Image: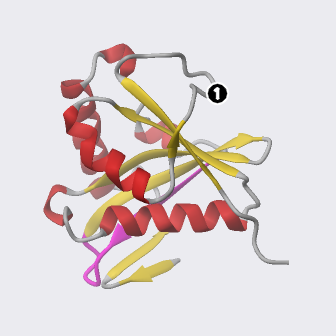
Amino acid sequence: MTATAAVTIRRDDPRRADVLALLEEHLADMYATSPPESVHALDPGALAAPGLTFWTARDDDGALLGCVALAELGEGGGELKSMRTATAARGRGVGGALLAHVLAEARARGHRTVHLETGTQDYFAAARRLYERAGFVVCPPFGAYVEDPHSVFLRRTIEPPPA
């Protein structure tokens, strides 16, 4: 669990009612922004599957502020999935807190890299800036991804914990 300026991040169930609404909004925006074959966001069932860890960020009153998942890629790597900040919480540092939490968790798990895929459209510009500020760099497609003009693939090297 991570707590930052009235934001508490904990493991959660992607099938909770308020989370379902946030994920429905996320998927709707992805399909409104990208061609269907370029949408790689996961549905709630996939986010509850083995090999994925799902977290939510909530305020002191329990209101949902955002969510993120980490998928295990094997060979010392993970993939950031379905990071979303609730519309009402944008600009409050929720995305940065979620990203920092996932990177800390990846490091604690011994991952050497964290990868992600995001869109190339203007809609995704703020997300790309956040990832770049956090040390992510452009990389080739990874896992089952293929080159796609609507996708950019990013990777961050994770330093091992001190001995």
150 lies above or below 70:
above
| Type of the residue with mark 1 | Gly
- Which residue is at the front of the view, 47 or 126? 126
Q: Position of residue 34 (x, y in %)?
A: 27, 22
* Left/right of residue 119 with respect to residue 31 in the rendered view: right
137 lies above or below 158:
above
**Residue appearing at x 45%, y 61% in the figure:** 99
Residue 91 within the magenta-colored segment of the rendering: no
Range of residues picked out in magenta = 52-63
In terms of secondary structure, where does tag 1 sit? loop
**Residue appearing at x 16%, y 56% in the figure:** 87
Looking at the image, can residue 11 be seen? no
- Which residue is at the front of the view, 122 or 6? 122
Q: Position of residue 8 (x, y in %)?
A: 40, 78
Instruction: Name the residue tied to disc 1.
Output: 143
Q: Position of residue 126 (x, y in %)?
A: 26, 49
**Residue appearing at x 67%, y 58% in the figure:** 158
